Image: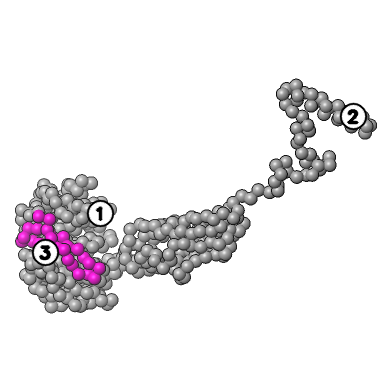
Amino acid sequence: MQFRSSKRATLCAAALGILLNACGGSDPVSAGTANNDPDNGGSGAPADGGSGTSVVANSVAPAVSPAGAITVTSGTNQTVQVTFTSSDGKPAINLSVTSDLTSLPAGWSSGSTSFSCASVTTGSTCQLNLTYAPTAARASSTLTLNFHYVDSAGASRASSVGITYEAKAAAPNSAYILNYSNQTVRRCAIGSDGALSACQSVASSLPAQPTSLAISGSTAYITSNWAGALTKCTIGADGTFSSCANAGLPAMSGPRSLIVIGSRLYIADGDNKKVLKCTINADGSVSGCKDSGVTLPGAVYAIAIKDTYLYAALNGGNVYRCDIASDGTISSCNDTGVTPFGTPFGMTVGGSTLYVVSNSDSKVYQCAIGSDGALSACAAGPTMLDGLDGPEGIAINGSYAYVVNYNAHTVSQCTVANDGSLMSCKDSGATSLNSPSSITFK
């Protein structure tokens, strides 16, 4: 039986060869194909003469913790870990971060000046620890870390990992109230319910008739209507003002309103009918003050800014809208066309609402701001019935609006509704005020 099976196999092989030749093929044996079948006396080696094992290169996959964008409040810190692992669990070698860890973006730091791992596999054995501790608000940015390694196939490879981060401004915990009659500043603590308490004097002997107060970092700026000047003060860790001195600006005439936007300071040069744009330097000093050449048709009592529009309230009660260029220059000022607002001594923007306080009729007016900066649906909000009496300034902090009442020597606290309207106004609790003219927060 064995002979017959062998003979039958031989005959089949011969028949297959004839068939292949007839069809234009070739006999694999006569073509010299190697016998690799170990059961028939072959070598068992791959037909291509290789080793039988192919090496697939792996990669290094960095993971950032916490995952997603890193959001930190200024004045606090967050530990951020970057863990390097191989894609298949097999070793990649000689990993090193090639970015300079000693010159990371502001607020970022590393516990070491360099980082490397001899071998990268799984787990947390190759982990870079970073700390983000911003001291000021910062828009969303990306920290990019470049690194280099050798993969499992022996090839040198370069890659990077990006960490998206931003810093939010810390919620103010103090209100600073400027007193017109006795040239002082009172600092009050802000409670969780928005109430003001524990008020104390932090500045005195300011130039006569101080009209407006603005703060940038640890520097305060105060306009003086009588002196026609800007005073700059340093704010200490305990909130007190020191080193108050003339900021050295060209003489103004009746300056009444201030706005800080980043490194820019805008001043309503009242009786000169202009708005000045100044640069705030790193040390808090002010320079480069100039007007854009635009002269408004009346004394400028108050200013407010929304995106690329500046609003200027004039002594006749009219509100003008000006365009702000990318360099901060003001141009194309036009009357908004809204009904004049009594005596608009104060103005601010909250969301898409412009708030105007009128001293003469003790009201707060509210206008909707359109996407093109146009004002509409202006209506009176809180009045004397809500405790307002000769209001001169208004500012918003969180979900509360604060109105300084010159005649009543008080600050009214109002809740800002979802539609921007002001409601439930009451006395804020601030004490020992003397004809307050401005309020701001830090």
Q: Which residue is mark 1?
A: 351
Q: Residue at x 70, y 42 (%)?
A: 48
The circle drawn on residue 7 is 2
User: What percent of the width, then of the height, locates residue 388?
Assistant: 15, 63
Quadrant of res 299: bottom left
For the residues labelled 3 and 2, the Cα–Cα distance comes to 116 Å
Q: Residue at x 76, y 39 (%)?
A: 34
For the residues labelled 3 and 1, the Cα–Cα distance comes to 23 Å
Colour setting = one colour
Q: Earlier in the sequence, mark 1 or mark 2?
A: 2
Residue that extends furthest to the top in the rendered view of this protein: 22
The circle drawn on residue 27 is none
Q: Which residue is mark 3?
A: 256
**Is 292 a magenta residue?**
yes
User: What percent of the width, then of the height, locates residue 16?
Assistant: 79, 26
Amino acid type of the residue tagged 3 in the rendering:
Arg
Pair 1/2: label in front? 2
Quadrant of res 408: bottom left
Q: Are marks 1 and 2 in contact (CB under 8 Å)?
A: no
Q: Secondary structure at mark 2?
A: helix
Question: Is 156 displayed left or right of 333 in the figure?
Answer: right
